[in-house]
Amino acid sequence: MPSSTAIEKTCVAAITNAAAAVVNDHLGMDASFAVPYQSGSQFQSFDVSVVMGINGTLEGQMICSMENKTALSVVSTMMGGMEMTALGDMGWSAIQEFGNWIAGKTAAELAESVESIDISPPMVNEGVSVFRMEGTFITLPLRSAAGQFSIHISIKENIS
């Protein structure tokens, strides 16, 4: 198994490729990333977060976080341009699916290299929260016409 630094680089590349493809293919927007950085063992989220577990040869968490106005823009685009002023049941479901698209595409990207992972069903968190984990989070800031997202990952080799 590669070193933890190599795993992190592989995961960052896979998530960057996956998120850019999802934003482009599903939302019809360009995506740009700022330099990834270590957030430490905790970070403060934006208003809306999609939380997914990662299992397989790697294990950990992937959290896609965005401001409420970004979530509304994403859902509006996913709904064919229908104006959204609040996230109702359909909106929350769409945000879950958006996170699932990024996680699923990431799993496919990693499968092309060496890793085989499964993604848990997405869970949505409403409101600003502080997420904590024993490991270190790496944050990947993403910008698009919909707004700013942050994708936070904490991944390590599954040694069991």
Image (tube, grey):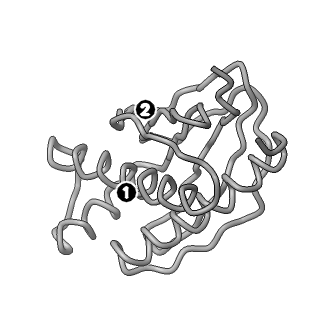
Image quarter (top left, top right, bottom left or bottom right) of the C terminus:
top right
Residue at (64, 53) in percent of width and height: 114
Residue type highlighted by circle 2: Gly
Q: Position of residue 83 (x, y in %)?
A: 19, 66
| Neighbours of disc 2 within 10 Å: few (<14), some (14-19), many (20+) | few
Quarter holding residue 25: bottom left
Q: Element under label 2?
A: loop
Left or right position of 87 against 148: left
**Dots 1 and 2: beta carbons under 8 Å?**
no
* Camera-side residue of 97 and 110: 110
* Camera-side residue of 31 and 147: 31
Residue at (79, 42) in percent of width and height: 38
Q: Where is residue 39 in the image (x, y as percent from the top left)?
A: 76, 38
Query: Which residue in the structure is indicated by mark 1?
Result: 101
State the mark number for residue 155: none
Quarter holding residue 47: top left
Left or right position of 158 against 53: right
* Above or below for 72 versus 125: below
Reading the chain from its start, which is encountered first: label 1 or label 2? 1
* Above or below for 4 versus 42: below
| Neighbours of disc 1 within 10 Å: few (<14), some (14-19), many (20+) | some
Image quarter (top left, top right, bottom left or bottom right) of the N terminus:
top right
Left or right position of 7 against 65: right
Q: Position of residue 18 (x, y in %)?
A: 52, 64
Query: Which residue in the structure is indicated by mark 2?
Result: 127
